[in-house]
Image (tube, rainbow, N blue to C red):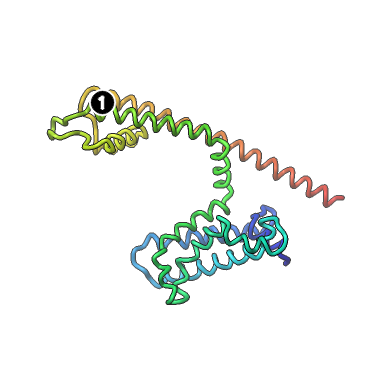
C-alpha cells in the first residue's frame, strides 16, 4: 500500500473503498467509547484500559495523517510535514491524545489535569460523519439569514426584559421584587421566548402576563423559522453532494473505459 492509498483511507472516507468506510466507522466507535469514562466519577480498571487503547488508536491516526500531510495540504517537499502539526485539525487531534499520555509515563501525570480535553474528541466526529459535515456547510451558506434571526431574537429578548423589569415591581405574595436584577429579567425573557417555561420566575401583573403570552407566541415563530431554513438547506446540500458523487463516478467509468 502506497502513501496515496493510505491517505484516501485515512482522510476521504471513500464510499467505494471498504477499508476506508471501516476505518471511519472504527474511529467513530472509538470516539464514543473513549467518552464513556467522562460519565463515571470513579476510575476503574476497565476505564483505564479504554483510555489507553483509545489514546493509542488516536495517536496512530495522528501519525498516519502526519505521514500523508503532503497529500492533505496539496504541497510537495518537506514543508507540509512541518506545517501540519500547527494546523487547527492537528492541534485538536493532539489535544484529544494528551489526557491519555499519563498512563504511559508517570512523569506525564500532569496531563491528567487536562482530563476534560477528552471532550475535544467530539470535534473529530465532524470530520468523520458526513451528515454533520452537511450541517456545517448549511450553516455557512445560510449564515446571514440565521444571524439575522438570532439578532432579532436577542433584540426581542432585551426589549421584553426591559419592559418586564420596569412593569413587574413587587410580588404581592412575597413582598419582594420579582426581578432582583436585570439579568433575571433577561433570563425570564429567554425562557419565555424559547417556550421553556421553568416556572421559577413568573409575572403576577396583568401586563406582565400579557407580555408572557405574546413572547411565547413570538418564540414559536422565531424557533420555527431557522428550523425551516436549516431543513431546506440540508436537503439542497444533500442533493448537490449526491449529484457531485454521481458526476465523479461517471468520470471514473469513462476513464476506465478509455
Callout 1: 10 Å neighbours few (<14), some, many (20+)?
some
Q: Residue at (41%, 60%) from the top-left corner?
A: 116
Q: Residue at (45%, 61%) from the top-left corner?
A: 118
The image quadrant of residue 108 is bottom left
Left or right position of 144 against 68: left
Residue 167 x/y as whole percent: 23, 26
Left or right position of 189 against 228: left
Element assignment for label 1? helix
Residue tagged by mark 1?
209
242 and 133: which one is in front?
133
User: In this picture, is 30 found above or below 253?
Assistant: below
195 and 109: which one is in front?
109
Q: Residue at (79%, 46%) from the top-left corner?
A: 251
Q: Residue at (26%, 26%) from the top-left corner?
A: 209
Q: Can residue 144 be seen in this view?
A: yes
User: In this picture, is 136 found above or below 111?
Assistant: above
Left or right position of 129 against 149: right
Residue 134 x/y as whole percent: 58, 44
Residue 47 x/y as whole percent: 42, 68
Residue 225 x/y as whole percent: 47, 30
Amino acid at each position: 500500500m502506497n502513501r496515496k492509498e493510505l491517505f484516501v483511507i485515512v482522510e476521504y472516507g471513500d464510499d467505494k473503498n471498504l477499508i476506508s468506510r471501516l476505518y471511519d466507522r472504527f474511529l467513530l466507535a472509538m470516539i464514543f467509547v473513549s467518552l464513556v469514562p467522562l460519565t463515571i466519577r470513579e476510575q476503574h480498571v476497565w476505564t483505564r484500559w479504554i483510555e489507553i487503547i483509545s489514546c493509542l488508536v488516536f495517536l496512530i491516526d495522528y501519525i498516519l495523517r502526519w505521514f500523508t500531510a503532503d497529500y492533505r495540504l496539496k504541497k510537495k517537499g518537506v514543508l507540509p510535514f512541518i506545517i501540519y502539526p500547527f494546523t487547527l485539525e492537528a492541534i485538536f487531534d493532539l489535544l484529544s491524545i494528551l489526557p491519555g499520555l499519563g498512563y504511559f509515563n508517570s512523569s506525564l501525570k500532569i496531563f491528567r489535569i487536562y482530563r476534560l480535553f477528552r471532550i475535544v474528541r467530539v470535534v473529530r466526529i465532524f470530520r468523520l460523519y458526513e451528515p454533520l459535515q452537511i450541517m456545517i456547510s448549511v450553516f455557512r451558506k445560510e449564515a446571514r439569514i440565521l444571524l439575522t434571526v438570532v439578532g432579532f431574537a436577542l433584540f426581542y429578548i432585551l426589549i421584553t426584559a426591559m419592559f418586564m423589569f420596569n412593569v413587574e415591581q413587587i410580588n404581592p405574595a412575597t413582598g419582594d421584587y420579582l426581578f432582583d436584577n436585570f439579568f433575571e429579567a433577561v433570563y425570564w425573557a429567554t425562557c419565555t421566548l424559547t417556550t421553556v417555561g421553568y416556572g421559577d420566575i413568573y409575572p403576577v401583573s396583568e401586563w406582565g402576563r400579557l407580555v408572557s403570552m405574546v413572547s411565547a407566541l413570538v418564540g414559536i415563530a422565531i424557533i420555527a423559522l431557522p428550523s425551516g431554513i436549516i431543513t431546506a438547506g440540508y436537503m439542497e446540500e444533500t442533493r448537490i453532494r449526491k449529484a457531485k458523487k454521481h458526476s465523479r463516478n461517471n468520470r471514473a467509468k469513462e476513464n476506465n473505459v478509455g
